[in-house]
């Protein structure tokens, strides 16, 4: 019963040596196969190094072919930084990519640290957790050198072929020579001998080199001798150009082109070659060099010539601009002088008549001439206002404005103005955005546009006033010379005669008009243009002859509601103004006198100053002041705004009335004034001035 058990134990005991033997046999076969590989083979394992994780690798296995193909012995256990310190990082990068991606690579590389060129194939060993890469490689240095030698030989051959082909194509071969270096025997062919007037028989028998050198130009002999010595010393191809005396006694350029053949031990054996005529080639090269020199000179002076030409153009442009400027100034001043002379004649004539009537005691008709003088003065003020609007320097009073409401309020007036023969139609955009603009100026602009449209339709027609919201993208805004964004448009179109492109181009110029003399000043469109541009907008005219015209005003959208900006009307003053004081500052004595008279007529106490420093001294005193009235343009270092700012520092909350001739709008922050400040424009109506003073000082 124990037999089977004992046999089993015996079998178990005998299996151990057999398993060890099989394993040893398998390892032997593996090692034999490993060593049978002629190529170099190794397995590398990545480790963490001084440069970070997986920044180094160790050779864990290698066959004998490793040493044969690299010359490095006992590689197992060594780091790449030990065997190739200058190239280690490059090898780590190459094989590290294989380890990271699992993608095998194949490449050729110069292994500089061992002086060999190797062909490599590498792949990752799985699983990747082993961090191992197998590398199979071979030394291909001899092949690479052979390839390089072949390429060099091919290059020399190509060069020689090209030279010969060039010479044959040009018919430039003079002759050939053969120099046997050990015997110093120099043989030439018949063409060589004929070209230089030598005896062909001597050439066949053998010349001395001195006889040939005697034909070389004296200045080129030393260079030729040196070139020959160098060619013989190194062997290989030879080419040298020099001048020689031909049979006609003249010197010509030629090229000696040959090759020095060497024995295996480096001993010079022979020096065969050919002579080429390069006279024409050198002439062509000289011509090309001359052309290059000229081109270089042109390039070197190009910047200066461009600068000179640019300066000339700029000077011509400046002269043209100055001429155009003087023409515009002449047109402007001519029209201005014409209109003001008419107005001044009315004012001056009326005042002369008033003085005469007073001297005569005839005062019953004075009102007629006073009213006439006042009317002319108001028209002069209106003309000045239009000029300043054109120059964009008028004082504006911008408010959040509903253009639809403004058009609706003016509609009846427009219809009465253009007459019954013209139909007026309005197309109001629902939900129109508000815009920040001076509503009075916009009303004047709309009325002017409708009057122009009426004058363009002498036989009747129709006028359309249309409003819209506009989104201007980059391209559209650029076409209209505006920043991109949201705008409100108001367009006035008619069915009249239209305009030519030349008229459209000049339509906004001051005093330019197509109307007959006496029918208009030519300031309407220029005033509209200046007012709209000053308001941050733009004006555009669209018209064709016989097809009517449309003028569009584009004004920026305002994001506050209309009702939030509208100012309430000031209630009339009902209480006494006695014991109130006003400081009047103006450098013009006549204007200062009129304002002081208006102040005193209201029962107020008036103090005067002719400039800012005088006003400042009064403000620094203990004198009571309830209102400051100051001109904006003042002499002696302080303008009216600076006087007002200083006054409010000394007397917080002091009310200020600015008196301006329109042109100082920038000083007044373009109409955006602080609470308790107002503006009155010159020339002013005395009654309006008195009412404004009364309202401010009593408010």
Image (spheres, rainbow, N blue to C red):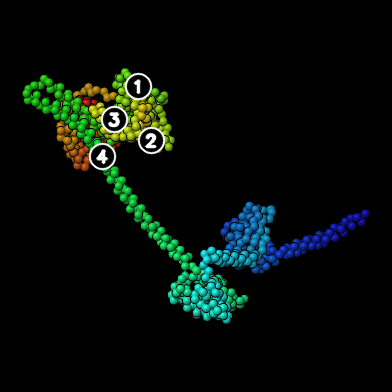
Say which mark, if any, is on residue 438: none
Say which mark, if any, is on residue 461: 1
First of labels 2, 1 by sequence position:
1
Q: Compared to 488, does 642 lie above or below?
A: below
**Residue contact between numbered discs 3 and 2, judged by CB atoms under 8 Å:** no
Judged from the image, the secondary structure of the residue bearing numbered disc 2 is loop
Residue located 36% across and 53% down the image: 306
The residue labelled by disc 3 is 514
Which residue is nearer to you in this view: 87 or 121? 121
Quick one: label 2, few (<14), some, or many (20+) residues within 10 Å? some
The residue labelled by disc 2 is 480
Gap in Å between the C-alphas at discs 1 and 3?
19 Å
* In the displayed structure image, the side of residue 234 where residue 654 appears, left or right: left
Judged from the image, the secondary structure of the residue bearing numbered disc 1 is strand
Q: Is residue 658 visible?
A: no
Residue located 19% across and 24% down the image: 576
First of labels 3, 2 by sequence position:
2
Q: Which label lies toward us, 2 or 1?
A: 1
Judged from the image, the secondary structure of the residue bearing numbered disc 3 is loop
Q: Position of residue 552 (x, y in %)?
A: 36, 30
First of labels 1, 4 by sequence position:
4
Gap in Å between the C-alphas at discs 1 and 4?
37 Å
Quick one: label 3, few (<14), some, or many (20+) residues within 10 Å? few
**Residue contact between numbered discs 2 and 1, judged by CB atoms under 8 Å:** no
Q: Compared to 363, does 393 lie above or below?
A: below
């Amino acid at each position: 019963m124990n037999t089977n058990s004992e046999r089993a134990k015996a079998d178990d005991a005998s299996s151990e040596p057999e398993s060890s033997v099989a394993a040893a046999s398998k390892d032997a076969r593996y090692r034999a196969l490993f060593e049978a590989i002629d190529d170099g083979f190794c397995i590398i394992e990545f480790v963490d190094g001084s440069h970070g994780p997986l920044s180094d690798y160790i050779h864990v296995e290698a066959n004998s072919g490793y040493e044969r193909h690299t010359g490095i012995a006992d590689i197992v256990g060594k780091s790449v930084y030990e065997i190739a310190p200058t190239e280690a990082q490059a090898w780590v990068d190459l094989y590290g990519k294989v380890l990271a991606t699992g993608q095998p690579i194949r490449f050729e590389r110069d292994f500089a640290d061992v002086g060999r060129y190797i062909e490599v194939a590498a792949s990752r060993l799985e699983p990747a957790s082993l961090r191992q890469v197998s590398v199979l490689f071979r030394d291909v240095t001899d092949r690479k050198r052979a390839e390089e030698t072949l390429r060099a030989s091919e290059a020399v051959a190509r060069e020689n072929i090209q030279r010969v082909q060039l010479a044959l194509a040009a018919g430039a071969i003079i002759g050939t020579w053969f120099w046997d270096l050990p015997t110093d025997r120099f043989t030439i062919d018949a063409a060589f001998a004929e070209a230089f007037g030598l005896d062909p028989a001597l050439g066949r028998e053998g010349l001395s080199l001195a006889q040939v050198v005697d034909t070389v130009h004296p200045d080129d002999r030393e260079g030729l001798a040196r070139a020959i010595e160098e060619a013989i010393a190194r062997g290989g191809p030879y080419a040298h150009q020099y001048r020689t005396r031909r049979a006609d006694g003249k010197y010509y350029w030629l090229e000696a082109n040959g090759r020095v053949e060497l024995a295996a031990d480096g001993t010079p054996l022979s020096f065969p070659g050919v002579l080429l005529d390069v006279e024409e080639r050198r002439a062509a090269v000289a011509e090309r060099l001359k052309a290059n020199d000229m081109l270089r000179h042109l390039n070197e002076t190009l910047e200066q010539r461009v600068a000179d030409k640019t300066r000339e153009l700029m000077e011509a442009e400046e002269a043209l601009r100055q001429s155009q400027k003087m023409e515009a100034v002449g047109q402007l001043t001519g029209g201005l002088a014409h209109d003001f002379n008419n107005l001044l004649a009315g004012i001056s004539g009326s005042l002369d008549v008033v003085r005469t009537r007073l001297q005569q005691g005839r005062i019953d008709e004075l009102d007629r001439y006073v009213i006439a003088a006042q009317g002319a003065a108001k028209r002069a003020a209106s003309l000045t206002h239009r000029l300043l609007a054109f120059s964009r320097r008028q004082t504006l009073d911008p408010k959040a404005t509903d253009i639809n409401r403004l058009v609706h309020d003016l509609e009846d007036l427009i219809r009465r103005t253009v007459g019954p023969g013209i139909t007026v139609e309005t197309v109001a955009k629902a939900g129109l955005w508000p815009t920040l603009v001076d509503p009075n100026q916009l009303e004047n602009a709309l009325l002017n546009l409708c009057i122009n449209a009426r004058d363009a339709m002498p036989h009747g027609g129709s006028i359309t006033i249309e409003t819209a919201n506009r989104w201007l993208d980059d391209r559209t805004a650029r076409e209209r010379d505006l920043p991109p964004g949201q705008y409100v448009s108001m367009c006035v179109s008619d069915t009249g005669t239209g305009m030519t492109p030349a008229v459209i181009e000049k339509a906004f110029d001051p005093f330019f008009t197509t109307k007959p003399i006496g029918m208009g000043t030519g300031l309407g469109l220029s005033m509209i243009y200046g007012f709209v541009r000053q308001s941050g907008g733009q004006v555009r005219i669209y018209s064709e002859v016989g097809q009517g015209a449309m003028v569009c005003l584009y004004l920026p959208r305002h994001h506050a509601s209309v009702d939030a900006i509208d100012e309430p009307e000031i209630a009339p003053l009902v209480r006494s103004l006695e014991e109130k004081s006003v400081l009047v500052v103006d450098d013009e004595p006549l204007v200062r006198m009129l304002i002081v008279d208006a102040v005193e007529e209201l029962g107020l106490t008036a103090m005067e100053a002719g400039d800012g420093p005088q006003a400042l001294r009064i403000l620094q005193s203990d004198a009571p002041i309830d209102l400051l009235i100051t001109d904006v343009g003042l002499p002696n270092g302080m303008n009216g705004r600076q006087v007002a700012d200083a006054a409010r520092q000394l007397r917080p909350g002091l009310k200020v009335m600015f008196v301006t001739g329109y042109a100082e709008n920038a000083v007044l922050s373009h109409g955006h004034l602080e609470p308790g400040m107002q503006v009155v424009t010159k020339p002013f109506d005395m009654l309006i001035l008195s009412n404004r003073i009364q309202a401010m000082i009593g408010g």
